[in-house]
Structure formats: structure tokens, C-alpha cells
Image (cartoon, grey):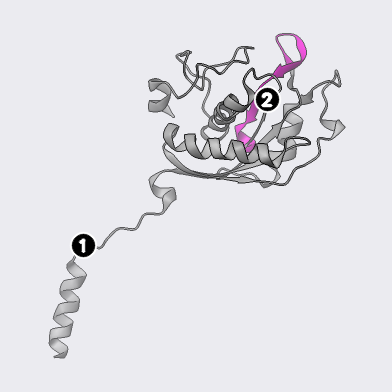
């Protein structure tokens, strides 16, 4: 009887084991924290979360969870030199504290945001910006023509910059979400990644 059990146990040990995969071993994964500022409401953040939940899995090869944080106040210390727009680098500095490569923070605001300087213009207005090394980015719907419809596209654009450290679309494809806006705030024709970006992200 004992010998029989030993033989069965030995034979079982020769059978191939079912593999178990940690999600980190088979695909990209991250938790995305939406950080609303000032009058960007929790309801609006929830609406963006629904859009990201619906679209990220279709566009990107990965497993992403979206969480919403309590609102924070925009400090006047974040204002740019002209005191009319909020500097993206200062906002990202505010977001980076708990961020890492698997915990990405996206700041959300209705206020106008800017870079310190671009093309010789102080406080150059932008839709969003990211610093991949800080695992954080910020987006604003202030300049968007279709705010409710297109904010998820801007958020996805900046998330891809941040999480994948990926540049603007090298092919400059008209319909690619990663196309450089080049000062134009219209995402109407951008719904997905182009074939090149899908293959290279």
C-alpha cells in the first residue's frame, strides 16, 4: 500500500504543472490615480474614469485600474510668471510624491495650464504635460473644443507619455492619439493609436 502511494506520488511529480502567471510577468499593469483639483468635480472625475475603463483596454496591451482621489486645492504658488496659468511642472511636482512605475498620477483641472517657456513664449498654454521620470502628468480641458467627449483622449495621450516613456507619434498620423497637438486643441479625429505606435509602444 505504501509502495503504491510512493509510485503514484512519483508519477504525479512527473506530470506537467499548470502554470500560474503573475500579471506583471505577462503584460503591462498599473494603477492610475486621478487627482481632481479645485472645481473639477468628483462626478466629472468618475465620468473620465468610465471613459478610461472603456477605452484603455481596447487601445493598449495591459491591465489598468483607475482610482479617484479626493479633490485638492490649486495653490497660487503653482501659477506661472503671468499669474494667469498654472505651471505643469509645479503641478507634477505636487503629484509625484506617491507615484512610481506602477502607480501613475494624473492631475485634472479646468484651469488653463502652461509650460514655463516654449517658442519664446512665456507660460505657453497646453492641454497636458508629463514627466515620465516622476510617473505623473496633468491634463486640462480648458482649451479643448469638445471637453466631455475628448478629455479621455488627452488623458490617454499623457498617460502613454508617462507610463511608457513614449514620444509623440513618429509618423504624425492624423488619427493617432499620440500625434503632437502642435498648438491645436482639437482631438475630434483622434480615436486610437496608429499601426506604427501600436507596434512600438
Q: Find disc 2 in the rendering and name its residue.
A: 141
Q: Sequence order check: which comes first, mark 2 or mark 1? A: 1
Q: Is mark 2 on a helix, strand or loop?
A: loop
Q: How far apart are marks 2 and 1 (CA)?
A: 54 Å
Q: Find disc 1 in the rendering and name its residue.
A: 16
Q: Going 58% across and 40% down the picture, which residue do you hit?
A: 49
The image quarter containing residue 16 is bottom left
Q: Is mark 1 on a helix, strand or loop?
A: loop
The image quarter containing residue 200 is top left
x and y, in percent, of residue 54 in the image: 48, 37
Q: Contact, CB < 8 Å: mark 2 with mark 1?
A: no
Category of crowding for the residue at label 1, using alpha-carbon neighbours closer than 10 angstroms: few (below 14), some (14–19), many (at least 20):
few
Question: 26 and 39: which one is in front?
Answer: 39
Q: Is residue 148 above or below residue 185?
A: below
Classify residue 68 as left or right of residue 196: right
Whether residue 134 is in magenta: the answer is yes
Classify residue 67 as left or right of residue 64: right
Q: Is the magenta stretch mostly helix, strand or loop?
A: strand
Which stretch did the figure color magenta? 117-135
Amino acid at each position: 500500500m505504501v509502495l503504491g502511494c510512493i509510485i503514484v506520488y512519483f508519477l504525479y511529480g512527473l506530470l506537467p504543472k499548470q502554470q500560474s502567471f503573475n500579471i506583471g510577468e505577462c503584460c503591462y499593469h498599473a494603477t492610475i490615480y486621478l487627482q481632481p483639483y479645485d472645481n473639477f468635480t468628483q462626478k466629472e472625475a468618475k465620468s473620465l474614469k468610465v471613459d478610461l475603463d472603456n477605452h484603455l483596454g481596447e487601445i493598449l496591451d495591459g491591465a489598468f485600474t483607475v482610482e479617484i482621489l479626493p479633490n485638492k486645492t490649486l495653490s497660487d504658488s503653482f501659477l506661472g510668471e503671468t499669474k494667469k496659468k498654472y505651471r505643469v511642472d509645479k503641478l507634477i511636482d505636487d503629484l509625484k510624491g506617491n507615484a512610481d512605475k506602477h502607480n501613475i498620477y494624473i492631475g485634472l483641472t479646468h484651469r488653463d495650464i502652461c509650460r514655463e517657456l516654449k517658442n519664446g513664449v512665456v507660460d505657453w498654454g497646453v492641454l497636458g504635460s508629463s514627466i515620465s521620470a516622476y510617473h505623473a502628468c496633468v491634463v486640462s480641458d480648458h482649451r479643448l473644443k469638445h471637453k466631455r467627449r475628448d478629455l479621455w483622449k488627452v488623458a490617454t495621450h499623457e498617460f502613454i507619455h508617462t507610463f511608457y516613456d513614449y514620444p509623440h507619434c513618429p509618423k504624425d498620423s492624423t488619427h493617432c492619439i499620440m500625434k503632437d497637438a502642435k498648438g491645436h486643441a482639437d482631438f475630434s479625429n483622434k480615436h486610437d493609436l496608429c499601426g506604427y505606435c501600436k507596434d512600438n509602444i
